[in-house]
Amino acid sequence: MTIEICSLGGYNEVGKNMTAIKINEEVIICDMGIDIPAIMEIEKDRSEVTKNDMIKAGAIANDYEIEDWKSKVKAIVIGHAHLDHLAGAQYLAADYNCPIIGTPFTIEVLNVILEDERSALPNPCKVVPPNGKIKITEDITVELINITHSTAQCSIIAIHSPEGIILYANDFKLDNTPTFGEPPNYKRLEQLAKKGIKLLIMDCLYSSTEGKTESETVAKEKLQQVLMKQNNAGKAIFVTTFSSNIARIKNTMDIAKKLKRQPVLIGRTMIKYAQAAQNVEIANIINYAEIGKYRSQVERLLKKVEKERERYLVICTGCQGEQNSVLDRIANKALHFKFKPGDHIIFSCQTIPVPETIKNRKTLEDKLSKLSVNMFFNVHVSGHLRREDMKEFIEMLQPEFLIPAGGEDKMKQSFLTLAEELNYKKDKNIFLLRDGERKQIQ
């Protein structure tokens, strides 16, 4: 009678999160993500890319590591709607004879991605509301506990089993005053802590960053300071943020209205998330913005913005300097829009701390700076816990065993130091895993 973990992805790197949890003879998979920088290196047309192409490029987890478990997999549970947690399902999920489970927004994002890429999966999708439960087998029930993050309807996955409660909490923060959605469900987490948590698999991304992560309310205030206190007369305003951050997009649109500017939403990924939010009726973004998803729409909208700069506020992709994002294409003159000296570009984000992204952002900033625009950086708060939040969370739950996830080796080492301060001991009750490893929890 054992629990065994296979750390398939997200244990060497930030991205392509995927963990298989075997409880006796039944397996639950948590997340099926992609590594976004790795995908950018694939030269084939996306429609021609196979699962093996993706594994070879390091863009998705190598699930051949659990070939002997495949017939035992009872469910794929997605914690939230970020691509590094769900977009790998397009390539991996069909190999498993089981449902895909998530909150309404998470499942809708997956459906929108599949529809947009003319793809389909044989797996049934089962929608569970935030704080809802679903019985998977006679012995296993999955619960999706509401938590806050930088996208909507994020969940901590609680797996209830005869061997104890396992919590998979990969990517979240403790925001007690979110501007969108409900605060963390502390009451339920405390109830589970009283029952006893066997294992906590937990976000370690900012384990070396001291302090506590600020609320999204602070990000909204920062945006208002930049957008409403600057002289915007006659100037174009571009705000770039993560496509999945529905709260940030909605807050930016609200500020645009105060400025008497029409919000313009541009970027294929951004429109996918906005459409998913509209489809499940959690945010009405599409109806209140002018939308540019395809090139012809984008060109037409940018022409309007260029002609009447004071009338619009553009929210677009490119916050990480991604190739083929809207800002990247404008900077490389692949889209016909000319920034003028003094135009405002607000980066409502921070750079994901991986080498490829840092390089891409630096390249984009260098190109934009030559245009003499005003750039405002880090108008943002993170969607991840910092060190003091992590201590608070662990102390609240008192798990018997700990495994850090969602980070590189240096992040896991920082998390280990933190856990040792709370009397956890390496290889006794906290385990540092790498991609493809297995660990039994007794």
Image (tube, rainbow, N blue to C red):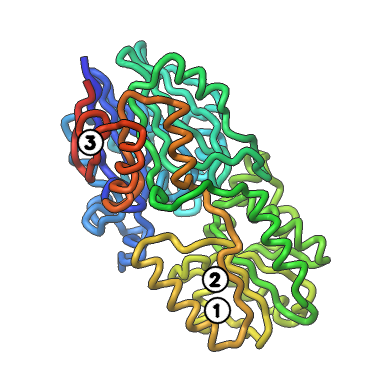
Q: What residue sits right under mark 3 in the picture?
A: 426
Residue 17 seen in this snapshot = no
Q: Nearer the viewer, mark 3 or mark 2?
A: 3
Q: What residue sits right under mark 2 in the picture?
A: 326
Q: Reply above or below: 218 against 183.
A: below
- Relative image position of residue 430 (x, y in whole percent): 27, 33
Location of the N terminus (image quadrant): top left
Mark number, residue 330: 1
Closer to the chain start, of discs 3 and 1, is 1
Q: CA distance from mark 3 to mark 2?
A: 45 Å
- Relative image position of residue 292 (x, y in whole percent): 63, 65
Q: Secondary structure at mark 2?
A: helix
Q: Are marks 1 and 2 in contact (CB under 8 Å)?
A: yes
Q: Is residue 96 left or right of residue 171?
A: left
Q: Reply above or below: 122 against 56.
A: above
Residue plotted at (69% across, 53% down): 250
Q: CA distance from mark 1 to mark 2?
A: 6 Å
Residue 407 seen in this snapshot = yes
Crowdedness of circle 1 by 10 Å Cα count: few (<14), some, many (20+)?
Answer: some
